[in-house]
Image (cartoon, rainbow, N blue to C red):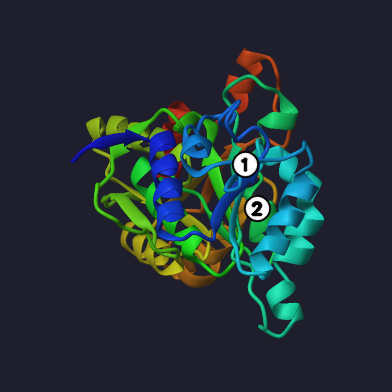
């Protein structure tokens, strides 16, 4: 099977959906002809589809999402890009109080088929305002779907599913994933929301990881295998809906779980997943639930300090051994 980068898989998904459905259009800062996107996901799309369907916007996140909501409720399928996920804070009212609630507020008479794409995560030395992982904010808002693809295959499949959905979707992409390559079919496909992917089967401990942490967990598992420790790795792929069944069944098998995420530990995504395990699989646990996440601190600009707080393979291996 051919291989594509994560970035190219996203671009291909957007292109295919724009060809399939003329109501799909893109909007965001610097996504058009001149810059073609800060991370080049939209490269070439303005030239192919024109400025009407790939719209450069002013630097106004609230404006971008507000316009997208208006377009969505009047029959369009907007895909809005927020250049950095941290800046979604500037559109929180539009996302959480408008897009997420309109269907409910109007008794289901209108939907909001909106996708908000945005890159999250640290590791590229661009400091606190451009390096956070804020998935938990949107997990906490009823009415939003939350996608966290970790591979090119899922980036394309989940984005196509998101564009075809009648619900508002927050679609998070880790910056360090853009150049990563993986197998992507040439034929049309979608990846369903709410279905986790078991990346590796094992017997001794379950590791659930998201986004870029999946790749660190897989590397850690290879090292642990040399020490005769069998690890099962689960990628939830979407946080809302969350595939609780796959998580619980894995914990029943291994008796232990380590949750690895890049967001802050307090009230983060790992806290919610730990609560699910505690509520639904407590009797099967042979050790306390363990979490590896970033400490509750702003992301440092200093490269050594930034690397110090980001979870890595050594931290994951240490945590696995502690619960074993």
Displayed quadrant of residue 215 = top left
Q: Which of 52 and 72 is in front in this view?
A: 52
The image shows residue 221 at horizontal and vertical percentages of 32, 37
Q: Is residue 241 above or below residue 4?
A: below
Q: Name the quarter where the N terminus is drawn.
A: top left
The image shows residue 211 at horizontal and vertical percentages of 48, 42
Tell me what residue is drawn at x 34 percent, y 37 percent.
Answer: 218
Label 1 close to label 2 by CB (< 8 Å): yes
Q: In this view, does 206 lie to the left or right of 304?
A: left
Residue topped by disc 2: 136
| Residue 72 appears in view | yes
| Residue 151 appears in view | no
Tell me what residue is drawn at x 60 percent, y 35 percent.
Answer: 31
Labels 1 and 2: the sequence-earlier one: 2
Q: Which of 81 and 24 is in front in this view?
A: 24
Tell me the tag on residue 91.
none
Tell me the tag on residue 263.
1
Label 2 residue SS: helix
């Amino acid at each position: 099977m051919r291989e594509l980068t994560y970035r190219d898989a996203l671009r291909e998904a957007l292109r295919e959906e724009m060809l399939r459905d003329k109501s799909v259009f893109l909007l965001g800062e610097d996504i058009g002809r001149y810059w073609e996107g800060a991370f080049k996901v939209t490269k070439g799309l303005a030239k192919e589809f024109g400025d009407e369907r790939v719209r450069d916007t002013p630097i106004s996140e609230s404006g971008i999402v507000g316009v997208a909501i208006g377009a969505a409720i009047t029959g369009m399928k907007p895909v809005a890009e927020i250049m950095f996920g941290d800046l979604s804070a500037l559109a929180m009212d539009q996302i959480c109080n408008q897009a997420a609630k309109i269907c409910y507020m109007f008794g289901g008479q209108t939907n909001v088929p909106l996708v908000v794409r945005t890159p999250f995560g640290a590791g590229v030395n661009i400091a606190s305002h451009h390096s956070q992982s804020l998935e938990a904010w949107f997990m906490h808002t009823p009415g939003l779907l939350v996608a966290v693809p970790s591979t090119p295959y899922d980036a394309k499949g989940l984005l196509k599913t998101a564009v075809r959905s009648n619900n508002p979707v927050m679609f998070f992409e880790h910056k360090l994933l853009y150049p990563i390559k993986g197998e992507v079919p040439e034929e049309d496909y979608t990846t369903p929301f709410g279905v986790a992917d078991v990346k590796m089967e094992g017997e001794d401990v379950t590791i659930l990881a998201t986004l870029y942490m999946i790749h660190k967990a897989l590397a850690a598992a290879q090292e642990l295998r040399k020490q005769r420790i069998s690890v099962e790795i689960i990628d939830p792929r979407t946080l809302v809906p969350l595939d609780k069944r796959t998580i619980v069944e894995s914990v029943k098998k291994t008796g232990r779980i380590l949750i690895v995420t890049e967001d802050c530990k307090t009230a983060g995504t790992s806290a919610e997943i730990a609560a699910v395990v505690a509520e639904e699989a407590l009797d099967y646990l042979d050790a306390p639930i363990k979490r590896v996440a970033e400490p509750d601190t702003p992301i440092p600009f200093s490269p050594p300090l930034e690397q110090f707080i980001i979870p890595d393979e050594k931290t994951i291996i240490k945590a696995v051994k502690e619960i074993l």
